[in-house]
C-alpha cells in the first residue's frame, strides 16, 4: 500500500494561522497580564515561542513562555514508579492564565496528561488550549480555545507537522 502525502498547510498558512491565534489570545485575555504560554514538548514549544513573538509585536512587551514535558503523565506508557517527577519544574503556573500549546489535537489524551502535569505544578487561574491542527476523533471531552486549522480526518490518516526548528521546513501534511 502506497502512502499518499498531501500538504494541507504550507509555511505561509502556518504563519497566518499563528498570527490569527496570537490576536485571538490577546483579545480573549484583554492583553497578556498574568498569562504564560506553555508549549508541550516537542513541537508545541516551538509553536508557543512563535506565538509569544507575535504577541510581543502586538502588545509591545514579552509574554512568558515555558516548556512542558508530559512523558511521565501519559496514560499509554507503563507506570514506572508510584511517584511522578515534577514536569518541567521551571513552569510557574500558580494563579496564572495558562495558554497550553500543542501541534495536533487528536484524542485529547496528550492534553489531559498536560493538564495533570500543570495541576501538579500549582493551581492555575485558568487553562486555555491552542493547537495548530484539530483533527477530531476525541476520546475525552476536550475542546481547543484557539485552532489554526480544523482538518477532519479518518482514523487511518495521520497528520504530520514539520517545523523549521526541528525538521528544517514548515508544513502540515496529511498522510493517507
Image: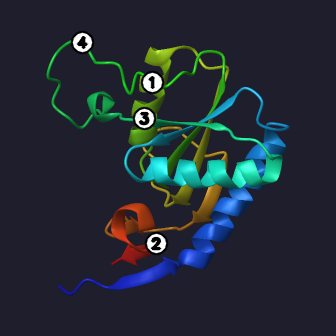
Residue 125 in the figure: left or right of residue 5: right
Residue 15 in the figure: left or right of residue 55: left
Alpha carbon distance from label 4 to label 3 = 18 Å
Residue under pointer 2: 172
Residue under pointer 3: 68
Q: Secondary structure at mark 1?
A: loop
Specify which label sits upstream in the sequence, 4 or 3.
3
Q: Secondary structure at mark 3?
A: strand
Residue under pointer 1: 90
Q: Please report contact status of discs 4 and 3: CB closer than 8 Å, yes or no.
A: no
Specify which label sits upstream in the sequence, 3 or 1.
3
The N terminus lies in quadrant = bottom left
The x, y position of residue 134, in whole percent, is: 53, 58
Question: Which mark's residue is nearer the viewer, 4 or 3?
Answer: 3
Residue 83's disc is: 4
Other residues around mark 4 within 10 Å, as few (<14) / some (14–19) / many (≥20)? few
The x, y position of residue 146, in whole percent, is: 66, 50
Other residues around mark 3 within 10 Å, as few (<14) / some (14–19) / many (≥20)? many
Other residues around mark 1 within 10 Å, as few (<14) / some (14–19) / many (≥20)? few
**Residue at horizontal 49 percent and vertical 61 percent from the top:** 135
- Residue nearest the observer in this picture, 94 or 64: 64
The x, y position of residue 165, in whole percent, is: 41, 62
Specify which label sits upstream in the sequence, 1 or 2.
1
Q: Please report contact status of discs 4 and 1: CB closer than 8 Å, yes or no.
A: no
The x, y position of residue 13, in whole percent, is: 61, 75
Alpha carbon distance from label 1 to label 2 = 30 Å
Amino acid at each position: 500500500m502506497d502512502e499518499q502525502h498531501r500538504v494541507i498547510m504550507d509555511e505561509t498558512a502556518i504563519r497566518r494561522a499563528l498570527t490569527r491565534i496570537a490576536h485571538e489570545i490577546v483579545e480573549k485575555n484583554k492583553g497578556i497580564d498574568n498569562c504564560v504560554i506553555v508549549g508541550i514538548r516537542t513541537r508545541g514549544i516551538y509553536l508557543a515561542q512563535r506565538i509569544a513573538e507575535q504577541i510581543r509585536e502586538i502588545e509591545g512587551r514579552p509574554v512568558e513562555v515555558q516548556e512542558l514535558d508530559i512523558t511521565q503523565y501519559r496514560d499509554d506508557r507503563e507506570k514506572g514508579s508510584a511517584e511522578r517527577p515534577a514536569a518541567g519544574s521551571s513552569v510557574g503556573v500558580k494563579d496564572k492564565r495558562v495558554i497550553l500549546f500543542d501541534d495536533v489535537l487528536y484524542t485529547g489524551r496528550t492534553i489531559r496528561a498536560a493538564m495533570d502535569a500543570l495541576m501538579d505544578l500549582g493551581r492555575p487561574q485558568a487553562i486555555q488550549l491552542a493547537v495548530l491542527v484539530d483533527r477530531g476523533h476525541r476520546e475525552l471531552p476536550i475542546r481547543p480555545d484557539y485552532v489554526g486549522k480544523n482538518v477532519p480526518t479518518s482514523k487511518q490518516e495521520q497528520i504530520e507537522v514539520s517545523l523549521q526548528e526541528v525538521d528544517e521546513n514548515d508544513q502540515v501534511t496529511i498522510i493517507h
